[in-house]
């Protein structure tokens, strides 16, 4: 069925919201784009005169496509090389979605997206639609073809699975740059005690190289072990430069709402280190170096303004 200008306009009005939902559900910007395109193709072929509320229909179709993807993704990740981490999205990207509330901002952090991997597919959908987009339980029930009471129960269970001991500290761009500068200076100093003081006792480091760039198969845990690992990670060597395709320039940025160290080689983002900051210190360092998961960040980096490189670069 042909799509006219009006129908395209209706869909485009929902695109940003659909992308934001899909990204939170899948943890992948590339997959989110694909799912939104699949939703548009179904919008093209459906008899739209039978659809009373396009927004609700589009949300339901997108969600069901994501549910199928989540099921297949679990199987793929069983054979994934090393640790799997979500794809980072830099500040200003519309795929991050609404950020008016603490819950909306928290739901898109790398730490939370990683935690949501422990949820079942339906738990993740209910949590995201409720927590990040404010859908009523009745609306979510219609999307998932469940009862409202069942949705409420699933939501409570998801909240229990995701309960955080320490809330994340929210920072603006200036504060994020200061944190990244201090983190990098401590790491480059080679003195683990300086970095330990910035970390929580139970801090972790997790890295995703996708089998292309070296990363450990399991997270490093504990402030001292993380400090030692990070000091080794940022120590400049020819071998590291060869692995990521050249000598990088280091920048401070904000990714998924948290301070981030961005390594740029030429016009390409080669790695993003996201710092999960709590009142007690940095609780997690997530390093994304899988080239396939940095394509959108590279496009966004090239298209956006950003502060100059850090003084203490490689």
Image (tube, rainbow, N blue to C red):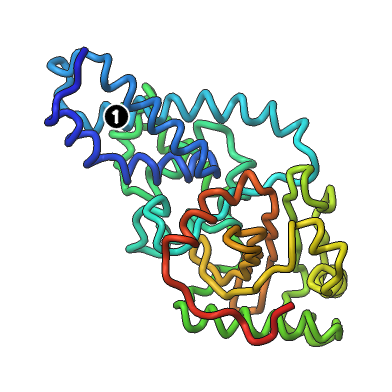
Say which residue label 1 marks.
58
- The foreground one among 249 and 209 is 249
Quadrant where the C terminus sits is bottom right
Residue appearing at x 84%, y 53% in the figure: 216
Image quadrant assignment for residue 232: bottom right
Image quadrant assignment for residue 277: bottom right
Q: From what the image shows, is residue 186 above or below residue 31? A: below
Image quadrant assignment for residue 145: top left
Q: Position of residue 181 (x, y in %)?
A: 63, 83
Rate crowding at label 1 as few (under 14), some (14 to 19) or many (20 or more) other CA atoms within 10 Å. Answer: many
Q: From what the image shows, is residue 244 above or below residue 295? A: below
- The foreground one among 131 and 153 is 131
Residue appearing at x 57%, y 85% in the figure: 178
Quadrant where the N terminus sits is top left
Q: Is residue 286 left or right of residue 148?
A: right
Q: From what the image shows, is residue 163 above or below residue 279? A: above
Q: Position of residue 146 (x, y in %)?
A: 39, 24
- The foreground one among 178 and 214 is 214
């Amino acid at each position: 069925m042909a799509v006219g200008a009006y129908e395209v306009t209706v869909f485009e009005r929902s695109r940003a919201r659909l992308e934001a939902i899909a990204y939170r559900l899948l943890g992948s910007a590339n997959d989110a784009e694909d799912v939104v395109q699949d939703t548009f193709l179904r919008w093209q072929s459906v008899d739209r005169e039978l659809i009373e509320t396009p927004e609700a229909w589009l949300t339901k179709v997108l969600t069901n496509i994501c549910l199928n993807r989540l099921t297949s993704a679990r199987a793929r990740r069983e054979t994934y090389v090393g640790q799997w981490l979500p794809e980072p999205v830099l500040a200003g990207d519309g795929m991050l979605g609404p950020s008016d509330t603490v819950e909306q901002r928290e739901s898109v952090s790398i730490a939370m997206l990683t935690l949501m991997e422990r949820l079942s597919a339906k738990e993740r959908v209910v949590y995201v639609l409720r927590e990040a987009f404010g859908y009523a339980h009745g609306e979510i029930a219609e999307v998932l073809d469940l009862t409202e009471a069942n949705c409420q129960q699933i939501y409570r269970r998801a909240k229990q699975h995701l309960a955080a001991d320490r809330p994340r500290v929210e920072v603006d761009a200036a504060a994020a740059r200061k944190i990244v500068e201090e983190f990098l200076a401590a790491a480059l100093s080679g003195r683990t005690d300086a970095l330990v003081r910035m970390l929580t006792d139970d801090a972790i480091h997790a890295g995703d190289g996708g089998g292309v760039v070296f990363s450990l198969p399991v997270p490093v845990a504990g402030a001292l072990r993380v400090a030692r690992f990070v000091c080794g990670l940022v120590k400049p060597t020819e071998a590291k430069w060869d692995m990521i395709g050249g000598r990088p320039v280091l920048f401070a940025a904000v990714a998924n709402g948290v301070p981030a160290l961005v390594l740029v080689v030429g016009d390409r983002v080669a790695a993003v280190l996201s710092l999960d900051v709590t009142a007690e210190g940095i609780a997690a360092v997530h390093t994304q170096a899988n080239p396939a998961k940095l394509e959108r960040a590279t496009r966004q980096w090239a298209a956006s303004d950003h502060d100059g490189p850090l003084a203490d670069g490689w």
